[in-house]
Every structure is written in structure tokens, then in C-alpha cells.
Amino acid sequence: MAPADAPDRGPAQPGEGSAPPRERTIRSFGTRGHRSDRAREICERLLPRYGIAPTNGPVDLPAAFGRRARTIVEVGFGMGETTAEIAAADPASDFVGIDVYPPGVARLLLRIEQRGLTNLRVIQRDAVDVMREMIRPDSLDAIHVFFPDPWPKKRHHKRRLIQPPVAALFASRLVAGGYLHCATDWEAYAQQMLEVLSAEPRLANTADGFAQRPAHRPLTKFEQRGLALGHRVWDLVFVRRGA
């Protein structure tokens, strides 16, 4: 994954409904072969405490947190810096971070332990599989997708996370009025996201095009340096239409 002060870059690919059959699902992440002994030790020690075990059926999120609360999923949390900050700033809500990479999972688990966060859980699995199999329809108040891998080469664009099947899947998991918030520092990907999300009939844009950065998304050190150099970040915030 990226260093801890880099934008979080995320996981996987397609979804449900109009999604292609499972055997044709394309992952938006590459395979990473090494896993440090330190990351393995942290995951073995802390995942049973702060993780939600992957299942092939819907998970009972209120039971996982011991309460019923507003529930937000972050898809692809990188090293977890932003995830931990958001959860710490909103203790009344429950957060689920999904990622596949052991170093990032280990880092976020340590952040949870060190900060004593009781409203944040981790699932180590491909995010689209989690959304499809573990998350019930009409159950999430928000989904965050911050700085997913832009796959800048044209031949790799099919690996990008935000495509029509995934937009449909994410929309189906939101409650009416729930929001999907995406952010990227790649303009071409931002334009693709805008086109894809605008075409999803269950989603409505909250802005005329791109949105201002909502207060709930903190700036990373990497982003602050980029903005100082004149770089841009594009935010998109769409809400699930009512029934």
C-alpha cells in the first residue's frame, strides 16, 4: 500500500444485478506476494478483537458493534489514517473498513487499539465480495471510496473500481437518503466516476458536477502537500433516491 500519509487507494471490482457473471469478475488490485512477520502477528492478535470474519451470507452489523447506529463503510482504506480520523471524530456512528492488504490491515488495527476506537471494525476481503455477500440491501447510511487505484494506463481502465455494475451494487446497499462519497486525484478518473454515477438511476448528484470536499473527509498530509503545489482533488457525493 501507499505510505501512511499518502491518499488511501482501494480494492476491487464489479458488482451485482447487471454485473457480469462471477467467473468474469475483474479485480482492481494486483497480487502482492510478501507479508511481513510483524503484519501477520498484528493481524493474528487483533483481527479477532476488531475484525469481522468474512462470511458467505449477510453479517449482523449491529451485533458486531453491540448497538444500532448509523453505519458507514469505507472501501479500500490503504493504511487507515483517514478511516481512523473519521471514526474518532464521529463516535455516534459505526464504521467498517474493507481492504485486502495485510500491511494496511495491520496498520489500521493498531490505530484502533492505540486510540481505543470502539466504533470501527475491519473486514479483510475483496470489497465487492463483501458488499455482494455480507452487506444487506438498504442497510448502509454511507459508503466512502477515497482515492481508489486510478489505473492510469488505458488498457487497465477496465480494472477501475467505479464502473456501472459496482455503482449499481453500492446504490442497492444504501438506505434512501444515504450517500456515496468518492474522491480521486486523477482528473480522467474523476470524469469517469461522474459519468458512471450520474447514469445510475438510484443515485442523485448533490452538486452540479463535482462537490466541495465535505467536512467529514479530512485532508491527508500527502493531499495538503499536493494542494500547496497546485494539484487538485475531485470529490463526488451522490445520494440514494427515495423509494
Image: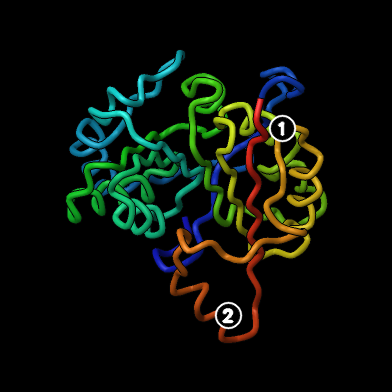
Q: In this rendered view, identify the residue nearer to me: 225 or 89.
A: 89
Using residue 209 as the reference point, say whether residue 142 is left or right of it. left
Q: Secondary structure at mark 1?
A: loop
Find residue 94 and report its horizontal and vertical position in percent: 34, 39
Residue 227 disc label: 2
Q: Residues within 10 Å of mark 1 (few under 14, many from 20)?
A: many
Q: Residue at x 66, y 42 (%)?
A: 161
Q: Residue at x 32, y 38 (%)?
A: 121
Q: Is residue 232 above or below residue 43?
A: below
Q: Residue at x 74, y 56 (%)?
A: 189
Q: Is residue 195 above or below residue 147?
A: above
Q: Earlier in the sequence, mark 1 or mark 2?
A: 1
Using residue 169 as the reference point, say whether residue 121 is left or right of it. left
* Residue to which mark 1 is pinned: 202
Q: Secondary structure at mark 2?
A: helix
Q: In this rendered view, identify the residue nearer to me: 17 or 174.
A: 174
The Cα–Cα distance between marks 1 and 2, rounded to whole angstroms, is 33 Å
The amino acid at mark 2 is: Leu
Q: In this rendered view, identify the residue nearer to me: 25 or 227.
A: 227
Using residue 225 as the reference point, say whether residue 183 is left or right of it. right
Farthest residue, direction bottom:
229
